[in-house]
Image (spheres, rainbow, N blue to C red):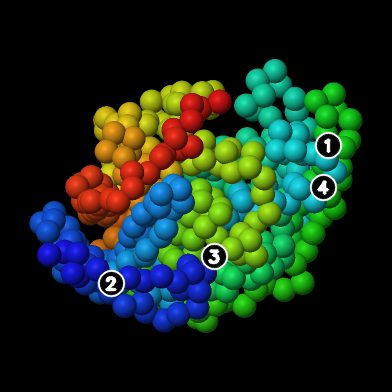
Amino acid sequence: MLRRLFTLLVVSMPALARAQALPDSPFLDSLLHTAPALAPVLRRPDVYQYQIIYTRIDRDAQNVPHFTQYTYHVNPRQYFNPASMVKLPTALLALEKLHILPLTVTRSTIMSTGVSFRCQTPVPFSAPADTTKWATVGNYIKRMLLVSDNVAYNRLYEFVGQQTLNTRLQQLGYSGSRIVRRFAPCDTTANRYTNPIVFYTPAGDTLYKQPAQVSPHTPTPPLGPVYAGHAYQVGQRIIHQPYNFTTANNLPLPDITAWLQSALFPESTPAAQRPQLTPADYAFLRQYLHLTPHASHVGYYTASGYFDAYKKYLYYGRLPNATSQPNLRIFNIVGMSHGYLADVAYFADSLHHTEFLLSAVLYVNRDGVINDGNYEYDSVGLPFLAQLGQLFSQYENQRARQYRPNLEVFFQPAP
């Protein structure tokens, strides 16, 4: 009986990031090995460096969710490049920061970005007729969550500022995390300096000015020196030494899992461990964490290149011709960079009345060369994540529950 193999792991997720390697769940070990398609990766943990977190959700009679985490090969001190995963905490902290500005500044207020230091790029004031093209905190978050837009992330990294980002990470209990760089070829010093920002009315009147900021120092790397691979590529040249990730962003899998849980189930996280957001903020996040590019009705994303599974790795494997299931909503954040492939997702199924959280990362870089673009995303990584999501979805569809969850909040119509 699989039920006898359950290992309950009830612990606050930020606390997990302070731990060493977490114990493997016998239940996960048993379930994962029922899927032959996963075997080529599972049998080589040293090569693929995979980590998996499954969070079971059980509702009580009042529909209050209770969470139980099961981990497999999870080690918060085993570095993986989080890539776009950092966009989720940055989005939440940008929404939080809006609430300390004058009330006239909201996520729909036009903002311009200036230049005050090297490696900075401007975004001048503009108020086109199409409001989806306005430079606003809300539109930047939409672009980050819908298609993982890097420029949008840069603008919000600059709005919040390196020092505030990392101060809040520490205050909220994420001691193993740090967000210290744009997605741009800026050096460590340049990333400490963030741009001046001005908020405007659509008529061009100034509402609020934020001066250029500088973090007094780059936060200390939580893992110390970090290297990966045996070589890396610069232009057409191969440098035969490991790639240095020491000054890169860091976001352990337990931490990003906690961020997603906090965004979707804020009441499940102690108030002192979550950003100070409003119900409207959470409703906004729910919409754009699950919407596909086409369903969002954002004009940028009507092209066929932004297919429905564009950012849905778990379950759909990012296949352009994947047929989405109308009863299944996936709220997620992904990362794909340097051979690291990750997806952290909440699944809600209105047909089978199921829900769960699933987080996974693996490394697919057979030749060990960083930045050569030769990664096994399509041949190994994405098929593995698709099979993983389908395995847990099938398991949840047959798992007995004492109370059927009311998932109505996750199936509200898009605005």
Q: Tell me if label 4 and label 2 are in contact, CB under 8 Å.
A: no
Give the foreground label among 3 and 4: 4
Tell me the SS state at disc 2.
Answer: loop
| Alpha carbon separation for disc pair 2 and 3 | 32 Å
Nearer to us of marks 2 and 3 is 2
Q: Residue at x 41, y 49 (%)?
A: 61
Q: Quadrant of residue 216?
A: bottom right
Of circles 1 and 2, the one toward us is 2
What's the distance in space between the residues labelled 4 and 1, CA to CA?
8 Å
What is the number of the mark on residue 249?
Answer: 3
Neighbor class of circle 1 (other Cα within 10 Å; few <14, some 14-19, many 20+) is few
Among numbered discs 3 and 4, the one appearing first in the sequence: 4
The residue that appears at 72% across and 62% down in the rendered structure is 164
Q: Badges 1 and 2: C-beta atoms under 8 Å apart? A: no
CA separation, marks 1 and 2?
Answer: 50 Å
Type of the residue with mark 3: Asn
Can I make out residue 357 in this image?
Answer: no
Residue 357 position within the rendered picture, expressed as x and y whole percent measured from the top left: 37, 53
* Relative vertical location of residue 247 with respect to residue 144 in this rendering, above or below: below
For mark 1, give the secondary structure: loop
Q: Is residue 374 left or right of residue 94?
A: left
Q: Amino acid at mark 4?
A: Leu
Q: Which residue is mark 2?
A: 7
- Left or right: 322, with 145 as reference point: left
Secondary structure found at label 4? loop
Looking at the rendered structure, which numbered label has been put on residue 104? 1
